[in-house]
Amino acid sequence: MKKNNFPRIFLSPPHMGGDELELIADVFQSNYIAPVGKHLTVFEHEIAQYVGVDGALALCSGTAAIHLALRLLNIQRDDTVFCSSLTFVGSANPILYEGGKPVFIDSEPDTWNMSPHALKNAFQQYIHKGKRPAAVIVVNLYGQSADMDAIRKICDSYETPLIEDAAESIGAKYHGKNSGSFGDFSILSFNGNKMITTSGGGMLLSNNVKALEKARFWSTQARDPALYYEHSELGYNYRLSNVLAAIGLGQLRVLDQHIRSCRNIFSRYQTELGHLPGIDFMPEPPGYRSNRWLSVMRVDPLVQSKTPVQLIEFLEQNNIESRPVWKPMHLQPLFHGTDFFSHTPQKAVSECLFKSGICLPSGSGMTDDEQFRVIDCLLSQLLG
Ligand SMILES: *Cc1c(COP(=O)(O)O)cnc(C)c1O
């Protein structure tokens, strides 16, 4: 495929703020390259304060954070765990690590996140079968919170703990409260493509500081307090390095700036393309404030002649990276045969979003010129 000569525009590349190298230099100066150090402690403290939770544990990935949350909730082999279907596989893989049985829940049209209606149906059916789920994992998609009041209410009525996957939604708000503060345990990701990055990393958040201490113990190979190496529990090598925490501290200083630019990028796409027939964008209902990590556009196949796949291919020919919306977990070969609860008896909302959605370049460092290159490409393909 011949590509034009313009430099590549990535979907969501890392965007350094400027202080990161200096903070890394601090770490080198102190020689606390490993295993832990001041930057790690400060990073945890600052994140906990930003989100509004009592404690935070820095880990090597968001996936590791979900895994430890499931361990803390004592998920056993064959336990049922309800999980959003429209998400990245990192939300669901840890259920399999523990031998649990995922059950996937469809999206609702208003937020594109877990449908409270489908969740309630799932609870009713599973309780009826005598299989009380051990946990619910709710995902905040593309930077927008799920309907936490409704979901929390359902979980509480069945006395089931809630894990909030806020990997994509740091800095987003739901009725004034920060994303990452709604779960019994919540998780963040600092993977390279996320709103802020440590190159790779994650965080486990909770008001249950005692539980976080247990997770801290497991995350460093579960070494019992003894001079020699003594182990009575299964552990992992999941801790974030102090060097990477220094990058995180630098990124935290520009987090609000990143959110502002991602929201501006979204508004511009919406202004320039949203008036076209059969084109719309991810909604933001009243009371929600998305961080707009990725700008997601929908293309109605009954109105527009180009499909999302054709548009993605055309953008690629112009050296622009875009992606379909996450392929729902209940459609993944890995999860073949798992149970799924749809929002409606007709076609699942998550399947429609997968078929009609495109994630457009949304990097917080994208320039106006770059964004207009993307917009011009799309305008040349879409019917006006
Ligand atoms: C990125 C992501 C994860 C996993 O985070 P890692 O840090 O890459 O392990 C989990 N859930 C969602 C929704 C994500 O987008």
Image (cartoon, rainbow, N blue to C red):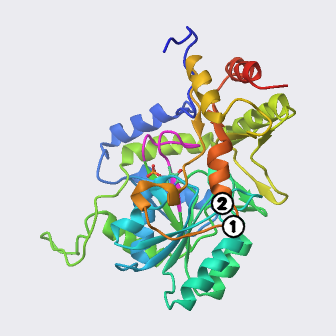
Q: In this orientation, does residue 170 appear?
A: no
- Looking at this view, name the residue that lies furthest to the top: 5
The spot of residue 172 in percent (x, y) is 69, 53
The spot of residue 53 in percent (x, y) is 60, 67
Check if mark 2's residue and mark 1's residue have beta carbons within 8 Å.
yes
Amino acid type, label 2: Ala
| Residue position marked by numbered label 1 in the rendering | 343
Identify the secondary structure beneath mark 1.
Answer: loop
Q: Residues within 10 Å of mark 1 (few under 14, many from 20)?
A: many
Q: In the image, is 217 to the left or to the right of 227? A: right
Residue range (magenta) = 187-200
| Residue position marked by numbered label 2 in the rendering | 348
Residue at 15% across / 74% down in the picture?
230
Q: Earlier in the sequence, mark 2 or mark 1?
A: 1
Query: Does residue 215 show up magenta in the picture?
Result: no
The residue lying toward the viewer, choosing from 125 and 214, is 125
Image: 366 above or below 332: above
Q: CA distance from mark 2 to mark 1?
A: 6 Å
Amino acid type, label 1: His
Residue at 12% across / 70% down in the picture?
228
Q: Quadrant of residue 174?
A: bottom right
The overriding secondary structure of the stretch rendered in magenta is: loop
